[in-house]
C-alpha cells in the first residue's frame, strides 16, 4: 500500500458527484476567463481556451471517468488521473496565476468572482484536459465501452465475455465497460463473491448475473452517497463507504475473515478469502518473486 489513499483515480461515482456539484454551482454562469497554468495539461489547441471566454456553462456530466463541462457545442473534457482533483471556490483571488507554479493546472473564472481549479499533486503530470467541439474527439472517450452503470445484463455479459482475462482486469478495462477502476472493482467482486482472478469466459450464468447486480448496486449506492457532498468532502466519503478496498488486515464486515492484498508494481487489490476464493489466499506475485 505504498500509495496513499488520496492517490486514486476518481471513478464513476466520484466523477458523477463532481458533475452534480458543477450542475448546482456552475451551470448557467458565464466563463470570464480560463487560465492554463500547466501547459502540458491542455491536450488540444483548436479551439483555443480563449474561445470559452464570455460563454455560459450549459451543462456538466461525465463519460465513464471523464468529467464533461459543456458550453453550447463546446466541451471541456477532463481526465483527473490519479492525483488530479477539482476545487470549486466561491471567491477567487483577482491576480492571475503564474504558469508552471504549484498544483493548479487550469483555472476557470466565472462572472460571479468564483470558479474552479483543476489541480494535480505530485510530479507525475497526467491530468488531461481537452477543449473540443465533439467529445468523441477525445481519444479516451471515443474508445469507451458502454457505461458500467447503464448496462443491462445482456450488454454487460456480452462486454465482459468480449475479452478473455481475469475478471478484475476486464471489469476495469474502460474499452469493455466505462467507469469502474481499482477501488470499486474490489468492492464489486467482493459483493459478487468472485475471485479477482476468475477468468471471464469461465463465469457461469449465475456468476455473471451476480457480477452485473453487484456492479449496479455498488455504483448506485456509492453515487447516491456521494452526490450532494460537494467536491471537498468526496474523498473522505468514498473511503468511509468502502468494505474491502484499501482495508488490508481489517476484518471483512460480511464474514469476519481478514482482508488480504495482492500487490502489483504501482497498485494493489484487496479481497476476502472466505467470501471470494474458497478460503484460499491468492498468490502475491510480487512476494513470490522476491522469495524465488
Ligand atoms: Zn468475507
Image (tube, rainbow, N blue to C red):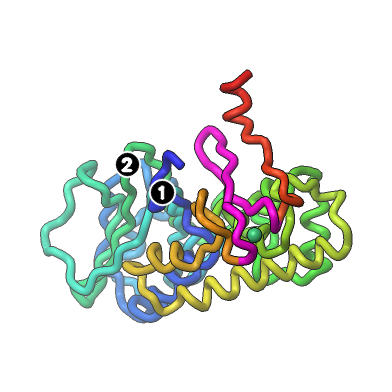
49 to the left or right of 72? left
**Residue 111, image x and y in percent?**
23, 75
- The numbered disc on residue 281 is none
In this view of the protein, which residue sits in the foreground, 183 or 115? 183
Q: Crowdedness of circle 2 by 10 Å Cα count: few (<14), some, many (20+)?
A: few
Residue at mark 2: 122
Would you say the residues marked 1 and 2 are in contact, meaning their CB atoms lie under 8 Å apart?
yes
**Quarter containing ligand 1?**
bottom right
In the picture as drawn, the residue positioned furthest to the front comes out as 256
Q: Secondary structure at mark 1?
A: loop
Q: Is residue 74 visible?
A: no
In this view of the protein, which residue sits in the foreground, 183 or 70? 183
180 to the left or right of 42? right
Query: Is 263 covered by the magenta stretch?
Result: yes
Q: Earlier in the sequence, mark 1 or mark 2?
A: 1
**Residue 162, image x and y in percent?**
81, 51
Stretch of the chain drawn in magenta:
254-275
Q: Quadrant of the C terminus?
A: top right
Residue at mark 1: 7
**Mark closer to the observer (1, 2):** 1
Q: Secondary structure at mark 2?
A: loop
Q: Crowdedness of circle 1 by 10 Å Cα count: few (<14), some, many (20+)?
A: few
State yes or no: Cβ of the residue under disc 2 lies below 8 Å from any atom of ligand 1.
no
Between the residue at mark 1 and the residue at mark 2, the CA separation in whole angstroms equals 10 Å
Q: Is residue 12 visible?
A: yes
Amino acid at each position: 500500500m505504498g500509495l496513499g489513499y488520496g492517490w486514486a483515480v476518481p471513478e464513476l461515482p466520484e466523477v458523477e458527484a463532481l458533475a452534480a456539484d458543477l450542475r448546482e454551482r456552475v451551470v448557467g454562469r458565464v466563463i470570464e476567463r480560463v487560465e492554463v497554468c500547466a501547459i502540458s495539461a491542455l491536450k488540444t489547441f483548436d479551439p483555443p481556451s480563449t474561445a470559452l471566454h464570455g460563454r455560459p456553462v450549459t451543462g456538466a456530466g461525465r463519460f465513464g471517468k471523464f468529467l464533461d463541462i459543456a458550453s453550447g457545442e463546446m466541451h471541456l473534457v477532463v481526465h483527473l488521473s490519479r492525483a488530479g482533483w477539482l476545487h470549486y471556490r466561491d471567491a477567487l483571488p483577482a491576480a492571475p496565476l503564474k504558469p508552471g507554479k504549484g498544483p493548479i493546472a487550469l483555472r476557470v473564472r466565472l462572472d460571479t468572482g468564483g470558479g474552479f481549479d483543476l489541480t494535480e499533486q505530485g510530479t507525475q503530470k497526467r491530468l488531461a484536459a481537452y477543449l473540443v467541439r465533439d467529445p468523441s474527439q477525445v481519444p479516451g472517450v471515443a474508445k469507451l465501452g458502454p457505461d458500467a452503470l447503464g448496462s443491462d445484463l445482456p450488454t454487460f455479459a456480452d462486454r465482459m465475455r468480449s475479452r478473455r482475462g481475469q475478471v478484475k482486469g476486464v471489469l476495469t478495462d474502460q474499452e469493455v465497460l466505462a467507469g469502474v477502476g481499482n477501488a470499486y472493482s474490489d468492492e464489486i467482486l467482493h459483493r459478487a463473491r468472485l475471485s479477482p482472478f476468475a477468468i471471464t469466459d469461465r463465469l457461469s450464468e449465475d456468476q455473471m448475473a451476480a457480477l452485473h447486480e453487484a456492479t449496479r448496486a455498488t455504483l448506485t449506492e456509492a453515487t447516491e452517497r456521494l452526490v450532494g457532498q460537494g467536491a471537498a468532502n468526496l474523498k473522505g466519503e468514498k473511503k468511509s463507504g468502502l468494505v474491502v478496498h484499501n482495508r488490508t488486515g481489517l476484518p471483512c464486515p460480511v464474514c469476519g475473515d481478514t482482508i488480504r492484498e495482492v500487490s502489483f508494481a504501482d497498485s494493489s487489490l484487496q479481497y476476502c478469502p472466505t467470501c471470494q476464493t474458497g478460503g484460499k489466499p491468492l498468490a502475491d506475485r510480487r512476494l513470490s518473486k522476491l522469495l524465488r
